[in-house]
């Protein structure tokens, strides 16, 4: 039994309450009461004095290639085509299990350090991704990537099916789904086949759709359909779908998507790769969305708060209207992403799963603050995340990560040198 004593609470709505004692047991919020309310017979094993702290639900990252933290900074200031074809895919083709495991741990460390309690991962090397997630304790939804145009596509699809069968009940913190890479890398019937495999196993899917204007134009040229139309015609929207990006979603696309379609919006990647102002911005109020980070090789970080911050400011800047995307609205969008994980997280209430952040806003970064949500959205960094908790377990405690980060960093520095020395291989697909 953990007691967060005399806490200030930031709800998923952004509403704030003071003087609460929050009791956590069995991974859940067992009891919330006025601070100091006697609870005879209840003896906490750990009490955190939260009188000067704020407790909120954790942050969620709806789209990451977590292992790509091993490539952070490897391809900067290049076009999307160069980034994929000449840098990332050739290096990825020679990745080892150690690269994937350590890269994933690096990404998880960055996320936990910044208050991210859950991540929807989309990558290959799923055995290593799963192992890293379990070792670190973060909540992770894993979508093993399948490229429909790869020469080993059929074997790969069977391999992913077997992985999911073997591991779908491993841990309450792990959920699995199918991860077709994108419409443009799954031509012809392959997209349909992957959707069918997901349907047979009763699982959702997670894929890249309409990230760039060029992708939509090429899809229309090759197939006469937008990427969303292709997924719809493959039966994809009969299942819950996590759409990475959808930046260039069209008006007609909106009629195709389901109530359980979620968008992971990653503005920092769009800014860095000059993806343009797609239709998402003006249609977002009619969509379920929250934020993702994409991989650290394109976005530079997997701290989802930064994405929300940029989203709020982009709208103000581009439309010359500082009243757009107020902090509370952006906070609510951040919190809404918890729905994707279906784990009972995202609220500070009795019975909720205890995926929480304890914020210290009395730091040089955030003082003096007038509203904690604005302070977090516009000023906070990892130093403000004092504690990160997943399923009632502290994974960052009093400012320190529970994992041996120094060991992970040492391993990563060695792997980074090996990776460069090994050089580039042949990419399976071209962007
Ligand atoms: Zn991505």
Image: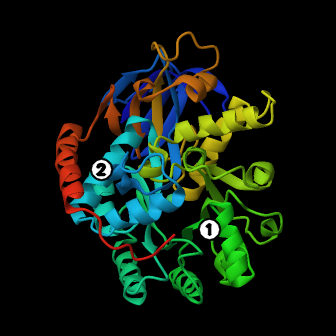
Residue tagged by mark 2? 105
In the image, taking residue 224 as reference, residue 268 lies left or right, namely: left
Which quadrant: the N terminus?
top left
Q: Residues within 10 Å of mark 2 (few under 14, many from 20)?
A: many
The answer to which image quadrant residue 73 occupies is top left
Residue at the image position 36 percent from the left and 62 percent from the top: 171
Q: Nearer the viewer, residue 86 or 330?
A: 86
In the image, taking residue 324 as reference, residue 246 lies left or right, namely: left
Disc number placed over residue 241 in the picture, else none: 1
259 vs 38: above or below: below
Q: Tell me how far mark 2 sits from mark 1, CA to CA.
A: 26 Å
Residue 13 visible in rendering: no
Q: Nearer the viewer, residue 134 or 278?
A: 278
Q: Is mark 2 within 8 Å of ligand 1?
A: no
Image coordinates for residue 423, horizontal then vertical, percent: 25, 62
Residue 127 visible in rendering: yes
Q: Nearer the viewer, residue 346 or 98?
A: 98
300 vs 262: above or below: above
Q: Secondary structure at mark 2?
A: helix
In the image, taking residue 85 as reference, residue 258 lies left or right, namely: right
Q: Is mark 1 within 8 Å of ligand 1?
A: no
156 vs 24: above or below: below
> Which of the marked residues, 2 or 1, is nearer the chain's N terminus?
2
Residue at the image position 46 percent from the left and 27 percent from the top: 381
The answer to which image quadrant residue 319 occupies is top right
Q: Residues within 10 Å of mark 1 (few under 14, many from 20)?
A: many
Image coordinates for residue 311, horizontal then vertical, percent: 65, 40
Q: Secondary structure at mark 1?
A: strand
């Amino acid at each position: 039994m953990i007691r967060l004593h005399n806490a200030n609470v930031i709800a998923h709505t952004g509403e704030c309450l003071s003087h609460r004692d929050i009791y956590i047991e069995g991974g859940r919020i067992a009891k919330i009461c006025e601070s100091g309310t006697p609870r005879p017979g209840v003896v906490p094993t750990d009490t955190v004095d939260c009188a000067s702290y704020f407790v909120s639900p954790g942050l969620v990252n709806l789209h990451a290639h977590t292992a790509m933290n091993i490539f952070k900074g490897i391809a900067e200031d290049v076009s999307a085509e160069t980034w994929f074809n000449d840098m990332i895919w050739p290096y990825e083709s020679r990745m080892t299990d150690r690269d994937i495991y350590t890269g994933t741990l690096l990404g998880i460390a960055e996320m936990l350090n910044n208050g991210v309690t859950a991540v929807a991962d989309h990558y290959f090397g799923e055995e290593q991704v799963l192992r890293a997630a379990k070792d670190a304790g973060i909540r992770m939804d894993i979508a093993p990537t399948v490229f429909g145009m790869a020469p080993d596509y059929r074997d790969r699809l069977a391999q992913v099916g077997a992985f999911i069968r073997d591991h779908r009940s491993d841990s309450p913190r792990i959920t699995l789904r199918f991860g077709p890479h994108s419409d443009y890398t799954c031509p012809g019937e392959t997209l349909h086949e992957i959707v069918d495999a997901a349907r047979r196993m009763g699982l959702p899917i997670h894929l890249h759709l309409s990230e760039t204007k060029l992708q939509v134009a090429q899809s229309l040229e090759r197939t006469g359909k937008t990427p969303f139309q292709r997924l719809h015609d493959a039966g994809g929207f009969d299942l819950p779908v996590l759409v990475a990006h959808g930046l260039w979603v069209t008006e007609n696309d909106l009629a195709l998507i389901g109530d359980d379609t979620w968008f992971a919006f990653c503005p920092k990647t769009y800014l860095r790769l000059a993806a343009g102002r797609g239709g998402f911005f003006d249609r977002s109020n009619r969509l379920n969305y929250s934020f993702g980070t994409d991989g650290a090789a394109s976005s530079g970080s997997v701290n989802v708060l930064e994405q929300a911050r940029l989203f709020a400011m982009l709208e103000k800047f581009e439309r010359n209207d500082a009243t757009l995307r107020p902090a509370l609205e952006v906070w609510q969008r951040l919190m809404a992403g918890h729905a994707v994980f279906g784990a009972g997280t995202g609220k500070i209430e009795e019975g909720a799963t205890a995926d929480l952040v304890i914020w210290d806003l009395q730091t040089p970064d955030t003082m003096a603050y007038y509203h904690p949500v604005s302070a977090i959205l516009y000023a906070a960094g990892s130093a403000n995340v004092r504690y990160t908790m997943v399923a009632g377990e502290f994974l960052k405690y009093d400012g320190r990560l529970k994992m041996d980060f120094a060991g992970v960093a040492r391993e990563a520095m060695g792997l980074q040198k090996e990776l460069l020395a090994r050089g580039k291989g042949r990419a399976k697909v071209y962007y």
